[in-house]
């Protein structure tokens, strides 16, 4: 591997080598052209000479093979006339004539050893009893089928002939006994050794990748290893059988290679054997391979000069790319792909101090491409997960925001937060449609649900589903918010071109609300009242719209008036006549009680009471407002799981009725309500935070692969992310993200130690993209996941070895 020792100390990778080779190729074009010309002039002549030589050698080898078979046939035919194989064999008693049997054993062994092509010699006699005998043993035959097969050997018209062995696996030559007699008493057979015959035939094609085989008169293969011919043998056989003239020599293309094929016939005892030999043409002309070497030697000096010039030119062309690569390796995430692994005590040192591993394999283009692909995959994965959790996160956040639990002071911050949740807003205006449901008696007392809260929850969900069905195809951005207290809000973001301030637009909303109201009341047997808020272009005023709408609903929920109220009309007029309820002060009082700020709660309540000082019947209006404030406080306590009756008793409203002065109301609220609420809110919120922290820990341990982010968990629990993060760190000594990372890496290490699962699959199982997982694991453990697995297994193997000793 080539390196350039410069100040940046970056190794030269595959891209540099490819560039160098390209320049080298360009510089070597003259030498290549010269080599091609020399090759075309020299090798063509040498190929013709080598092919002619191959044909002459093939003819010589064919004649030699024929001579070997002639010798075998002549020798075997002579054995048939040996005196031992005369008519006396009819009277041979294999049980008592031991000497004659021994003489037969000796003679069969001599025949078997007389030629290396003979694999087995066998004697068959029909009389006095059917018996078969070889050089080792004899067996009397009792199977009629077997006897019939051997009898057919003596029925052939020729005294000596070629046939197949009884098992069909080898070639067999048969001599009828006794020799020269028409009355056959048996047969002497020799079975050829397939291995020796195959070796002898292989001399016809001594080249690697070639093939040689024999065919009988019907064109069937004669050797057992040729009975199921391969693709090349079948192709050659078909070609040879279709030739009109034999013997023949021709060239044949098969699977992109050229073969030189020769075929001919052996005349063997009245039958014709066809021999076929196919040799790769490139093996035949292999001796001319030295020609390119000669060309290389001739052009050696020019190539060395081209190499030197290519090296210098590559260095100059690579300089701009080095700067680009340095930009990528300067990033901590990408540098790990270039730098060699360092021990933990060396981390943080300059890159120039690192030794370069000669085995480092780096493709600069691939490095940049993989880095970019990894970033895109991580972005796509995060985008997919965000889209999956976006509806839940958007609904949770909007619930907190519209209720005023998470305060965003400006319109810009509101719009930015909504944009993060999938609402790309520009200059849209906002409007709220808030509905409150009152269940009927049938649902409250005989609905079949376990308790009243379960019945009310089902009604809220059903009403919300009906509203979502009505919104299908709705042209504006809309979000349905179920507050789970029998109230449902529809938040609309309407663009200016829809003219939301016009009467026609509000009539369209009234019609949609009327359809929703009719369906809910008819299908669920409930009463429902809907309030359509005023329009606002400031997103930070959305909580105020919700509070005003709730106030109207509380004032009208028991009235017999219209079921749909437009706050732009009579609702606003009624509020002016009866006095405006200070909703903002109500929220400030409840927030101060939640935060345990007793002084702020008293100060806000003083302003709350003072807002009625200048109205007619101030004491009555203030008393009614206090009733509503107490109801809101009790509702907040119920959400924390506390029973307001146990805290304040049943006579709390009667106590308020006995108060007549504003000062009395103020003193009663400070002494009777504030102190108790501060203690309950503070204690409950601390318990809620602690419970949320432990739930976060369980969530990270059990759902580490698809764990929610800190912001999503904070929105889910209704607690600010900063408060939740600080509480988690105080409880467990590290922040939530670090703890989740630790859980995932520990799980990954267990999978690496105990399974053979692929690294990419492990990364996905613990919730990471493979590229990011590799970088994170290396940063944490100082080594790659694959090397970590190898080290653990080597260590465990070494430990087991020591234990066994």
Image (spheres, rainbow, N blue to C red):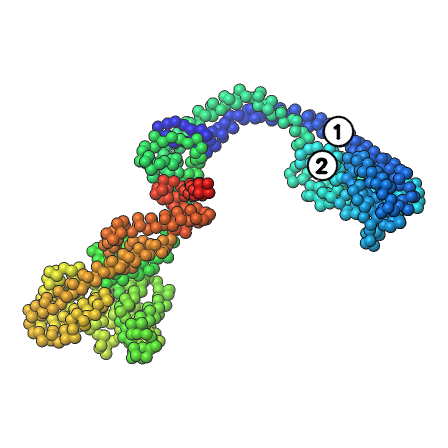
x and y percent of residue 235 in the render? 71, 42
Image height of 40 relative to 756, above or below: above
Q: Which residue is mark 1?
A: 57
x and y percent of residue 160 in the render? 87, 41
The picture quadrant where one finds residue 461 is: bottom left
Q: Which residue is mark 2?
A: 278
* Residue pictured at 11% horizontal, 74% vertical: 655
Tell which circle, 1 or 2, labels the residue nearer the N-terminal end: 1
Task: Check disc 2 and report its element: helix, strand or loop.
Answer: strand
The picture quadrant where one finds residue 241 is: top right
The picture quadrant where one finds residue 263 is: top right
* Distance Cα–Cα, label 1 vs label 2: 14 Å
Image height of 10 relative to 477, above or below: above
x and y percent of residue 353 in the render? 34, 30
Category of crowding for the residue at label 1, using alpha-carbon neighbours closer than 10 angstroms: few (below 14), some (14–19), many (at least 20)? some
Direction from residue 240 to residue 319 in the image, left or right: left
């Amino acid at each position: 591997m080539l390196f350039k020792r410069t100040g940046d100390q970056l190794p030269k990778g595959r891209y540099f080598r490819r560039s160098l080779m390209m320049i080298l190729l360009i510089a070597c074009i003259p030498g290549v052209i010269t080599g091609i010309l020399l090759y075309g002039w020299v090798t063509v002549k040498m190929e013709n000479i080598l092919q002619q030589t191959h044909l002459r050698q093939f003819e010589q080898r064919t004649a030699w093979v024929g001579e070997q078979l002639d010798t075998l046939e002549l020798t075997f035919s002579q054995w048939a006339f040996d005196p031992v194989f005369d008519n006396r064999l009819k009277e041979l008693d294999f049980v008592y004539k031991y000497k004659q049997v021994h003489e037969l054993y000796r003679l069969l062994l001599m025949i078997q050893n007389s030629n290396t092509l003979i694999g087995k010699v066998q004697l068959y006699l029909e009389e006095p009893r059917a018996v078969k005998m070889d050089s080792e043993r004899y067996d009397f035959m009792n199977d009629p089928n077997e006897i019939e097969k051997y009898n057919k050997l003596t029925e052939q018209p020729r005294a000596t002939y070629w046939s197949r062995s009884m098992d069909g696996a080898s070639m067999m030559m048969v001599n009828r006994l006794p020799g020269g007699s028409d009355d056959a008493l048996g047969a002497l057979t020799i079975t050829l050794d397939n291995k020796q015959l195959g070796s002898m035939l292989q001399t016809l094609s001594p080249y690697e990748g070639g093939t040689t085989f024999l065919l009988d008169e019907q064109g069937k293969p004669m050797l057992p290893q040729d009975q199921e011919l391969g693709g090349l043998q079948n192709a050659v056989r078909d070609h040879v059988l279709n030739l009109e003239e034999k013997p023949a020599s021709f060239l044949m293309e098969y699977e992109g290679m050229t073969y030189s094929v020769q075929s001919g016939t052996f005349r063997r005892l009245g039958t014709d054997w066809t021999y076929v030999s196919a040799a790769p043409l490139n093996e035949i002309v292999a001796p001319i391979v030295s020609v390119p070497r000669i060309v290389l030697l001739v052009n050696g000096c020019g190539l060395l000069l081209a190499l030197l010039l290519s090296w210098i030119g590559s260095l100059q062309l690579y300089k701009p790319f080095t700067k680009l690569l340095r930009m990528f390796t300067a990033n901590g995430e990408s540098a790990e792909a270039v730098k060699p692994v360092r021990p933990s005590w060396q981390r943080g040192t300059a890159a120039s101090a690192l030794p370069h591993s000669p085995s480092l394999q780096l493709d600069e283009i691939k490095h940049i491409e993989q880095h970019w692909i990894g970033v895109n995959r991580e972005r796509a994965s995060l985008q997919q997960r965000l889209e999956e959790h976006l509806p839940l996160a958007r609904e949770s956040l909007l619930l907190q925001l519209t209720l005023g639990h998470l305060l965003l002071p400006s319109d810009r911050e509101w719009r930015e937060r909504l944009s993060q949740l999938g609402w790309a807003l520009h200059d849209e205006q906002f409007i709220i449609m808030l509905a409150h449901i009152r269940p009927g008696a049938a649902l409250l007392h005989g609905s079949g649900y376990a308790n009243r809260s379960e019945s009310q929850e089902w009604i809220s969900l059903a009403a919300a589903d009906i509203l979502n069905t009505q919104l299908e195809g709705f042209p504006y951005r809309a979000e349905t918010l179920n507050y789970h207290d029998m109230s449902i809000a529809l938040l609309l973001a309407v663009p200016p071109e829809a003219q939301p301030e016009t009467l026609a637009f509000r009539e369209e909303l009234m019609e949609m609300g009327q359809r929703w109201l009719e369906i809910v009341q008819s299908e669920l047997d409930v009463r429902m009242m809907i309030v359509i808020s005023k329009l606002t272009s400031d997103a930070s005023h959305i909580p105020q719209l919700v509070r005003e709408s709730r106030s109207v609903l509380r004032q009208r929920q028991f009235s017999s008036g219209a079921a749909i109220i437009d706050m732009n009309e009579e609702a606003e007029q009624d509020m002016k006549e009866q006095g405006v309820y200070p909703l903002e002060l109500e929220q400030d009082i409840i927030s101060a009680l939640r935060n345990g700020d007793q002084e702020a709660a008293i100060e806000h309540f003083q302003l709350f009471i003072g807002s009625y000082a200048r109205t007619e019947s101030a004491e009555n209006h203030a008393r009614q407002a206090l009733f509503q404030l107490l109801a809101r406080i009790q509702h907040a306590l119920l959400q924390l799981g506390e029973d307001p009756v146990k805290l304040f008793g049943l006579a709390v409203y009667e106590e308020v009725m006995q108060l007549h002065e504003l000062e009395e109301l103020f003193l009663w609220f400070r002494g009777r309500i504030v102190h108790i609420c501060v203690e309950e809110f503070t204690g409950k919120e601390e318990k809620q935070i602690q419970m949320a922290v432990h739930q976060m820990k369980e969530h990270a341990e059990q759902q580490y692969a698809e764990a929610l982010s800190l912001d999503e968990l904070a929105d889910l629990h209704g607690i600010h992310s900063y408060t939740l993060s600080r509480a988690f760190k105080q409880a467990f000594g590290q922040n939530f993200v670090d703890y989740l990372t630790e859980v995932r890496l520990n799980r990954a290490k267990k999978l690496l130690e105990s399974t053979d699962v692929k690294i990419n699959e492990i990364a996905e199982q613990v919730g990471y993209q493979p590229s990011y997982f590799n970088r994170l694991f290396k940063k944490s453990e100082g080594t790659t996941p694959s090397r970590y697995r190898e080290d653990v297994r080597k260590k465990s193997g070494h430990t087991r070895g020591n234990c066994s000793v």
